[in-house]
Image: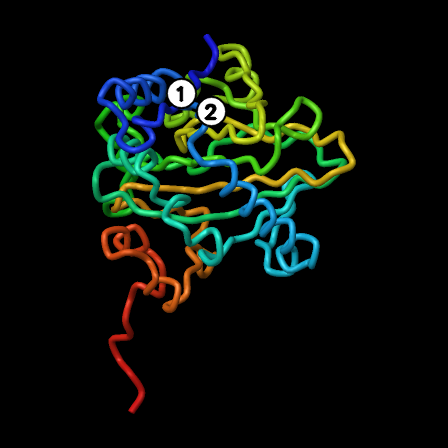
Amino acid sequence: MSIATIAFSRKDAKQPSSRTLKKVLAAMDRDGAVAFANLFPLPLLRRLRAEIARRHSSGELRARGLVRDIAGRYAAVVPFEGPFLEPAFYANPALRAMLAALLGEDYRISSLETVIAMPGAYRQHQHIDAPIRFDRSVAGRKVRFKGRLPELPPYAVTLCVPLCGMTEENGPTAIWPGSHRLALRARPPGEREIARKFPVERMTGAFGRSFFFDYRTFHGGMPNLTAEPRPVLMFVFTRSWFRDPNTADVFPRLAISERSLARVPARHRELFLLAPAARRALWEKR
């Protein structure tokens, strides 16, 4: 069964119906992923694309990027300014309703990155984004989490927003639907087991298609066989208590200035509580 794609009606875009939210929850429970045909308006996506293209062409993103190469790709934290500061991007009603249903009303923005697959980028290894089992260390002894980890609801979700049409040639994200149920076993599954048990789906589609995937869902980027860079946005949302260990050494992992934060409507400001700008200094120099 292929990953479900949800197209929002005008009414749903303003306030998703309970039926639509149930479809999202069911798809995420079954596949660990769900796609959207028109979550964001195309004019907004074009502005986001133009901003990323400008920063990429100037070399700014590469210079400020995270210190790693991902199979011919690079990742960079994107600051919330310009078109990224528009509520239609980070807090449109459909997005807020779905994330509240998945992560609870007090969910937070964890990070916003762009991942740009350069021409010639090769196949990325199959992986999940945060291999956490919630085990504890007590008196030097590991104590296993007693609950059934595969049955836990999502604690972190990535929204992937391609900034171009995605084809088989330009490096779509490959997802193994249903694989989130095996990710937190005491002995994590290998790539062969995932490939044997779950059919792969490449997230191709026209410009404007986006998709969620659970942090525990196995995925990986495919080769970019074209002569053009392939940019996507990776927008991570978490439950209020979760901290992503993969970004523990990235500062700031949520980049928004005090001036930009002051422009965020009060009803949305709690989304940015993990940003340094949301915290005041406890000890000031005199």
Against 227, residue 66 (above or below) is below
**Res. 37 mark:** 2
Q: How busy is the neighbourhood of tag 1: few (under 14 within 10 Å), some, or many (20 plus)?
A: some
The amino acid pointed to by label 1 is Ile
Total numbered labels: 2
Which label's residue is closer to the chain start, 1 or 2? 1
Residue that appears at 30% across and 44% down: 242
Residue 60 spot, x, y in % from top left: 64, 60
Assess whether mark 2 and mark 1 are in contact (beta carbons under 8 angstroms). yes
Name which residue lies at 52% across and 23% down: 175
Choose between 126 and 254: the one closer to the eye. 254
Tag 2: Cα neighbours inside 10 Å, few (<14), some, or many (≥20)? Answer: some
Residue 86: % across, % down:
41, 51
Q: In the displayed image of the protein, which residue is found farthest to the front?
A: 10
Check disc 2 and give the amino acid type.
Ala
Q: Quadrant of the C terminus?
A: bottom left
Separation of marks 1 and 2 at Cα, in angstroms: 6 Å
Depth order, front residue of 163/1: 163
Seen in the picture, residue 261 relative to 6 is either above or below; the reply is: below
Where disc 1 sits, the SS reads: strand
Residue at the extreme top: 1
Q: Residue at x 36, y 59 (%)?
A: 275
Q: Residue at x 46, y 48 (%)?
A: 112
Answer with the quarter of the image where residue 229 lies. Answer: top right
Q: Please say if 205 is above or below 245.
A: above
Q: Secondary structure at mark 2?
A: loop
Residue wearing tag 1 = 6
* Residue 279, image x, y percentages: 29, 66
Disc ID at residue 107: none
Relative image position of residue 199 (x, y in whole percent)? 52, 12
Say above or below: 45 vs 217. below
